[in-house]
Amino acid sequence: MENQKEVTIYDIARNLQIHPSTVSKALNDDPKIAKKTKKRIFETAAQMGYRSNLLARSLRQQNTLTIGVILPDLNSGFVGPLLSGIEKVTGMAGYGIIITDSGQSAEKEAAHARNLFQRRVDGIIVLPTTETTGFEHFKPFLEKHIPLVLLDRMANLPDVSSVVIDNRACGYMATQHLVAQGCRRIVLLAPNVDQDIYAQRYKGYRDALTESGLKAEKALIQLSPGSEEAFEAAAKKILAMKPLPDGVFAASDLAAAVCVRTFQEQKLRVPQDIAVVGFNNDVIGRLVKPQLTTVNYPGREMGDTAARHLVNHLRGEVNLMPITTLTIRADLIVRESSLKKGGRPG
């Protein structure tokens, strides 16, 4: 079948008997063109099957109207709201997004960064993996002054901004809640306590214990990677501790839910025998019994803020220099899994 000829602005202009430059300005939403004229042009363009040549436009304007997004786990519960916030802002601003999944692999994250650089994205939003220890793989972006916004991580680099929650305050808030419920031996369950967000949560955990006259015992720090099997193994280690801990602050709701299940299989009562607090406010926290107390990760607001900051920079409305850190509030959602003293969930 013979390919049908693409409709051009000249075809639209000829149809409406107006100048091609008027059509071009209207299609680019030039405010100088009257609304009535724009309406006629858009309707005619749609009827004739006109398609904007974004590639040609990007070559002329030296941009692609595309933003790259690198996330560590698209199956994670908090990623959906995060992406929703990013997509809403970028879409309204006329930008498309390329979404990639690093699978919690620093190597894949670096590969995605190279690919997005080759695709000439105008900017990039990244939630680094738990493996990521440096940002050398983003050096080509920085050298070309392509803006980078990090989620939940800070980097002392030019043209890099961060959108974070106060992880130290979150660690303090969760631990202090358990202390207030009467817990005295509280386990911290996390992938590590040396890196960025988990190091900050550990500091908050330690601050709350110290303030309450309790000791942050090394034996109560359980390090576990992010798989269901690993969380189950960690829960069994907690059960083997002497004396038995009476509280657990877990780095994710999945980790907390697996702990609840494992404890209950061993006939422990949650929260009467051992209270549990999770993190992220994932759906799983409302499905387990008892429902999980959790730190709400404001994913939609973080995605919205990161995208808005990046788009404003690309439009020249803000400058990423000096380095900017935007902190989003996170709250504790109190449910049954931590209420050792009874009472009603908040």
Image (cartoon, rainbow, N blue to C red):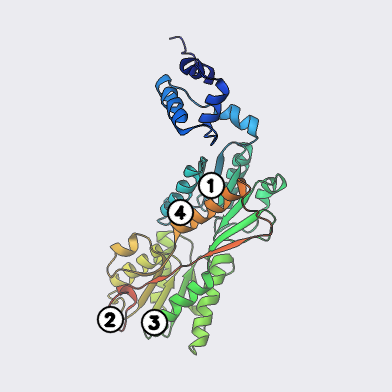
Residue 174 image position (x, y, % from top left) = 44, 75
Q: Quadrant of the N terminus?
A: top left
Image quarter for residue 78?
A: bottom left
In space, the residues marked 1 and 3 are separated at their CA atoms by: 43 Å
Disc 1 residue crowd, few under 14, some 14–19, many 20+, Cα 10 Å: many
The answer to whether residue 217 is visible is no
In this picture, residue 142 sits left or right of residue 265: right
> Which is in the foreground here, disc 3 or disc 4?
4
Mark 3 Cα-neighbour bin, 10 Å: few <14, some 14–19, many ≥20? few
Determine whether label 4 and label 1 are within 8 Å by CB: no
What is the secondary structure assignment of the residue under circle 3? Answer: loop
Q: Disc 4 marks which residue?
A: 82
Q: Is residue 252 visible from the viewing direction of this image?
A: yes
**Residue in the image at 46% along x and 9% along y:** 2
Identify the residue position indicated by label 1 in the image: 69
To which residue does mark 2 refer?
Answer: 343
Nearer to us: label 1 or label 3: 1
Residue type beneath disc 1: Val
Where residue 63 appears, x then y in whole percent?
A: 62, 37
Residue sitting at the far right: 143
Q: Residue at x 35, y 66 (%)?
A: 257
